[in-house]
């Protein structure tokens, strides 16, 4: 509703403008708070003002005060009812999946391979970088549906590329066919299957840029301006597999101090891009922050902001990583190796005086079948 290109949505909004309105939806917001702005503007476009005003106030919800302000603004016009609260009133359909075998033709298989290879390229000029993951999921779903389902979208991508090439500008928005589906797309992780594709992955050397004349900083020395940490390079490690590392936060830097102080830690590293992928939602992969080996175990460690731990995305990643560790442990037992475990550690629990064994005892996520002692 908030996009000028959404002709149908804006036509409905304008047609209903003189009347009282009630919007009913079972689809939660998926991709952007601007969807909330669009829906509320149908009811009353004065609630949030124009889109510029909404962006300035609510584009970044970082504190409890920000969320409280948004809740208060929505309270007079928004009523949320959970599914479990209406079970006695609505007879929900019991859905039963029927599985049919499908064998693609040679032409369909060729199309699937070509599109898959294209989507895996490092640089994709046809898709906006900020939306690449979600759009890739949508395209793969269309591709799995039929060649006819994706034909129009591929044509739209080609047209976008031609216009961008003529204007000498990058593609800023996906084709309209994808944009419409994107507004209603939701994919949740249900369960995970283990697929062994290779025996091992060779760790590649990591390359980092640093200003001329500047040396890597001692990782043990606290950084005064913590917002600048992402641009800094740290060194001085003894147990890390790499001589230098970058950290995304001061929590990660302090966790590295914990690992370097702990004599039980044999080695550790921060995986580079593509070095330690764990699939958790379709073709989307999750790459953990730290991989650690102690005298008795191998650990995937994820320091995370405490307020984010219970979000759906973090929980999906956690479930996938726990499953990965369970399967890796089964393999390790067969070859006499060490068990794996996954640690999801709140940022405020990372203290330089703590040990990895203590953190593992408090924050290991595991199923009842898996018990790991760090």
Image: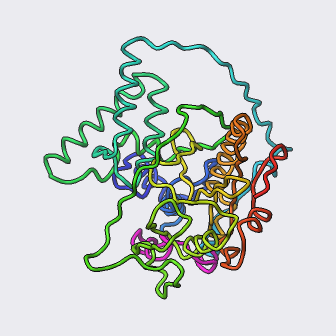
Asked whether 155 falls inside the magenta stretch, the response is: no
In percent of width and height, residue 178 lies at: 40, 41
* Residue at 36% from the left image edge and 43% from the top image edge: 176
The N terminus, quarter of image: bottom left
Q: How many labels does the image show?
A: 0
The C terminus, quarter of image: bottom right
Residue 18 visible at all? no
Residue 371 visible at all? yes
Q: Residue furthest bottom?
A: 224
Which image quarter: residue 260? bottom right
Camera-nearest residue between 292 and 26: 292
Q: Give the range drawn in magenta.
A: 47-69
In percent of width and height, residue 234 lies at: 45, 73
Asked whether 54 falls inside the magenta stretch, the response is: yes
Which image quarter: residue 327? top right
Is residue 347 shown left or right of residue 152?
right
* Residue at 48% from the left image edge and 48% from the top image edge: 275
Which image quarter: residue 196? top right
Camera-nearest residue between 363 and 265: 265
* Residue at 39% from the left image edge and 57% from the top image edge: 206
């Amino acid at each position: 509703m908030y996009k000028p290109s959404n002709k149908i949505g804006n036509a409905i909004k304008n047609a209903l403008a003189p009347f009282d309105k009630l919007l009913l939806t079972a689809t939660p917001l998926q991709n952007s708070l601007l969807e909330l702005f669009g829906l509320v503007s149908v009811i009353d476009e004065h609630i949030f003002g124009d889109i510029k005003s909404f962006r300035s106030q609510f584009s970044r919800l970082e504190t409890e005060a920000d969320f409280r302000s948004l809740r208060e603004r929505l309270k007079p016009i928004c009523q949320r009812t959970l599914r479990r609260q209406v079970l006695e009133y609505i007879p929900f359909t019991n859905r039963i999946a029927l599985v049919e075998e499908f064998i693609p033709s040679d032409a369909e298989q060729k199309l699937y391979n070509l599109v898959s290879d294209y989507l895996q390229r490092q640089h994709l000029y046809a898709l906006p970088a900020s939306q690449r993951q979600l759009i890739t999921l949508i395209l793969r779903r269309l591709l799995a549906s039929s060649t006819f389902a994706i034909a129009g979208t591929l044509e739209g991508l080609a047209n976008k590329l031609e216009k961008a090439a003529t204007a000498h500008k990058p593609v800023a928005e996906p084709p309209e066919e994808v944009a419409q589906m994107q507004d209603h797309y939701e994919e949740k992780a249900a369960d995970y299957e283990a697929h062994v594709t290779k025996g091992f992955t060779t760790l590649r050397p990591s390359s980092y840029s640093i200003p001329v004349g500047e040396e890597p900083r001692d990782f043990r020395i606290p950084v005064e301006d913590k917002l600048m940490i992402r641009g800094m390079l740290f060194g001085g490690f003894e147990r890390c597999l790499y001589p230098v590392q970058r950290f995304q936060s001061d929590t990660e830097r302090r966790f590295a101090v914990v690992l370097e102080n702990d004599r039980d830690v044999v080695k550790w590293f921060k995986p580079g891009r593509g070095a330690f992928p764990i699939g958790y939602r379709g073709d989307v992969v999750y790459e953990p922050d730290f991989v650690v080996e102690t005298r008795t175990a191998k650990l995937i460690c994820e320091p995370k902001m405490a307020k984010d731990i219970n979000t759906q995305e973090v929980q999906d990643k956690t479930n996938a990583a726990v499953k990965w560790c369970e399967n890796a442990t089964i393999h390790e037992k067969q070859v006499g190796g060490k068990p794996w475990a996954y640690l999801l550690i709140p940022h405020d629990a990372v203290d330089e005086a703590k040990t990895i064994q203590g953190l593992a005892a408090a924050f290991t996520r595991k199923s009842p079948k898996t018990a790991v002692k760090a």
